[in-house]
């Protein structure tokens, strides 16, 4: 059995996620695979709060962005130029 490689999303890809995502999709932001994500969620050790909606586990995009220190909105070209100056 081979281990599957987790593709870590870019900040812009995370910003494009819906308001809530599945535990494995959220886990990918930290390079955590599906099994590890569900294990951490069951243990209460997932990096951000996990929402139980009926029988479904979801994670908010805003919580992932905040924990990773990524602003909700992408910097504008003008903000980038001001930071470089």
Image (cartoon, rainbow, N blue to C red):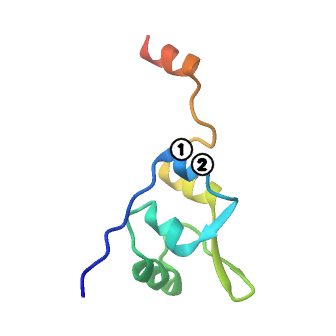
Q: Count all numbered tags in the image, as a single digit.
A: 2
Image quarter of the C terminus: top left
Q: Residue furthest front?
A: 1
Q: Position of residue 68 (x, y in %)?
A: 48, 52
Whether residues under marks 1 and 2 lie with C-beta atoms below 8 angstroms apart, the answer is yes
Q: Position of residue 40 (x, y in %)?
A: 46, 80
- Residue ID for mark 1: 12
Q: Nearer the viewer, residue 1 or 69?
A: 1
Name the residue located 63 percent from the left edge and 38 percent from the top edge.
73
Name the residue located 45 percent from the left edge and 85 percent from the top edge.
39
Taking 81 as reference, is 1 left or right?
A: left
Quarter-wise, where is residue 60 in the image?
bottom right
Taking 62 as reference, is 48 left or right?
A: left
Instruction: Count residues near mark 1 (Cα–Cα under 10 Å), then give few for <14, some for 14-19, many for 20+.
Output: few
Tell me the number on the disc at residue 77. none
Name the residue located 53 percent from the left edge and 50 percent from the top edge.
13
Q: Secondary structure at mark 1?
A: helix
- Residue ID for mark 2: 15
């Amino acid at each position: 059995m081979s281990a599957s490689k987790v593709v870590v999303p870019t900040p812009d890809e995370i910003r494009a996620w819906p308001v809530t995502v599945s535990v494995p999709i959220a886990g990918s932001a930290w390079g955590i695979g599906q099994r590890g994500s569900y294990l951490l969620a069951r243990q209460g050790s997932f990096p951000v709060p996990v929402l139980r909606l009926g029988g479904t586990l979801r994670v908010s995009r805003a919580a992932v962005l905040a924990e990773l220190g990524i602003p909700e909105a992408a910097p504008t070209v003008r903000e980038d130029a001001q930071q470089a100056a």
